[in-house]
């Protein structure tokens, strides 16, 4: 059964421009994304043409400076666009979030010359980005990464393997964190690496529980030569750049999680209204009504939490704690709501005839990516009580 078009959410938006933007996104979602979502996910097909359309529509650079092809949109608006896209298909919403994450380093830490040269095509030229921090032996402990970049005249030679890379093997550019100095976070530097660089190869995509249309793969760097002009920030600044990107990226994951949860609730509510048992719709039964009420409440709470964090970011205030809270709460909510949606549909919910079983499988990934929810609890606790004593 094809996915259901997302139901309009009553949004509080800061401008008429933002309302027009959401209308555009809903139109694209209904025409281009939803009708093919189930079939393409089942087949494991990545919707590259959809991303080209989003780029041409100005939707891949929304939170960045319009001088470089961005949309000048506050995070409060950008995240609600992500939510709409994720409600239509998580592969698309998450893909836009990852692309935005991959552009963060250059947009915030690059030189003026670097930004003028690269950002316009990254933001609106049909390109697709990937973010390379994790490795097989350094997931949550990202500061222990082993991929090395060795200086060779006015170039760097990058050698190593990155793991769990969304868009790995198909991206047009990679923001890569590599070790250029001492062990630990102070020895890491950021680089912008072209996707067609000699010595860069993507492994076969991982066979995942969900999000089969979104390729996740290892990326191998075999002496990949990158000119120093593609080093982002100072030598040794890479880990700070990576953490800065992740604070914003976690808000993207939170918004995607709420979009997925909203899609699951819409499907459950439609089914409960149509399905009749004992002579009346099952939505008449108090136990199920309370379940739906709890689902809706948690979604609204998650939406309010990620938007509050976004408004702090837009105001230039610290938001790392709130970003971790939003990522934690919203992705846990997505897991709970999608599981409950399967329960509402009963046996049908456990079949591929309805999308809620796919939503449940997809929700699990969101509790893991861009910092597991256990890491989010560590981040929150550190803000509350300070670092642990050793």
Image (tube, helix red, strand yellow):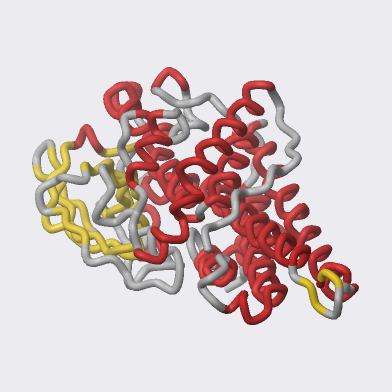
Q: Position of residue 321 (x, y in %)?
A: 66, 52
Residue found at x 26% / y 39%? 231
Task: Please indicate, yes or no, whether residue 193 appears anywhere in the rendered image.
Answer: yes
* Relative depth, front residue between 385 and 251: 251
Left or right of 104: which side holds 78?
Answer: right
Q: Nearer the viewer, residue 266 or 204?
A: 266
- Is 303 on the left-hand or right-hand side of 379? right
Residue 220, given in percent of the width and then of the height, sits at 20, 60
Residue 376 location, quadrant: bottom right
**Residue at x-position 68% and y-position 70%:** 341
In the image, residue 72 sits, relative to residue 286, either above or below, namely: above
Q: Residue, x 27% and y 24% (percent of image)?
A: 117
Q: Is residue 372 visible?
A: no
Query: Relative to 356, is 288 on the left or the right?
Result: right
- At horizontal 41% and vertical 67% (from top left) the residue drawn is 139
Give the vertical position of 17 relative to 336 (above or below).
above
């Amino acid at each position: 059964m094809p996915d259901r078009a997302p139901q309009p959410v009553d949004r509080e938006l800061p401008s008429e421009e933002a309302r027009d933007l959401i209308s555009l996104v809903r139109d694209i979602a209904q025409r281009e994304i939803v009708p093919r979502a189930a079939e393409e996910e089942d087949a494991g097909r990545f919707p590259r043409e959809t991303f080209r359309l989003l780029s041409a529509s100005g939707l891949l650079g929304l939170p960045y400076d319009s001088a470089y092809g961005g949309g000048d949109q506050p995070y409060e608006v950008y995240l609600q666009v992500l939510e709409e896209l994720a409600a239509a298909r998580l592969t698309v919403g998450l893909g836009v979030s990852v692309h935005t994450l991959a552009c963060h380093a250059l947009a915030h830490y690059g030189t003026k010359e670097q930004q003028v040269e690269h950002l316009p095509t990254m933001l609106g030229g049909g390109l697709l980005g990937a973010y390379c921090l994790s490795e097989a032996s350094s997931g949550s402990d990202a500061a222990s990464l082993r991929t090395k970049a060795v200086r060779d005249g006015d170039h760097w030679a990058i050698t190593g393997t990155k793991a769990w890379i969304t868009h790995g093997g198909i991206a047009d550019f990679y923001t890569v964190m590599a070790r250029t100095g001492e062990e630990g976070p102070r020895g890491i530097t950021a680089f912008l690496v072209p996707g067609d660089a000699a010595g860069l190869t993507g492994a076969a995509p991982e066979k995942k529980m969900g999000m089969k249309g979104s390729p996740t793969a290892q990326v191998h760097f075999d002496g990949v030569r990158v000119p120093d002009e593609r080093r982002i920030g100072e030598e040794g600044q890479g880990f700070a750049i990576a953490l800065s990107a992740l604070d914003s990226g976690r808000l993207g994951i939170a918004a995607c999680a709420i979009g997925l949860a909203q899609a699951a609730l819409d499907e459950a509510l439609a089914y409960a209204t149509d399905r009749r048992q004992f002579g009346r719709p099952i939505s008449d039964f108090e136990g199920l009504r309370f379940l739906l009420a709890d689902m809706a409440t948690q979604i609204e709470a998650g939406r309010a939490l990620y938007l509050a964090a976004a408004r702090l970011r837009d105001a230039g205030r610290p938001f790392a704690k709130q970003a971790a809270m939003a990522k934690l709460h919203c992705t846990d909510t997505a897991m709970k709501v999608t599981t409950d949606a399967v329960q509402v549909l009963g046996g049908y919910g456990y079949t591929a005839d309805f999308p809620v079983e796919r939503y449940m499988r997809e929700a699990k990934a969101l509790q893991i990516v861009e910092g597991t929810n256990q890491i989010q609890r560590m981040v929150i606790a550190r803000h509350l009580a300070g670092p642990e004593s050793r």
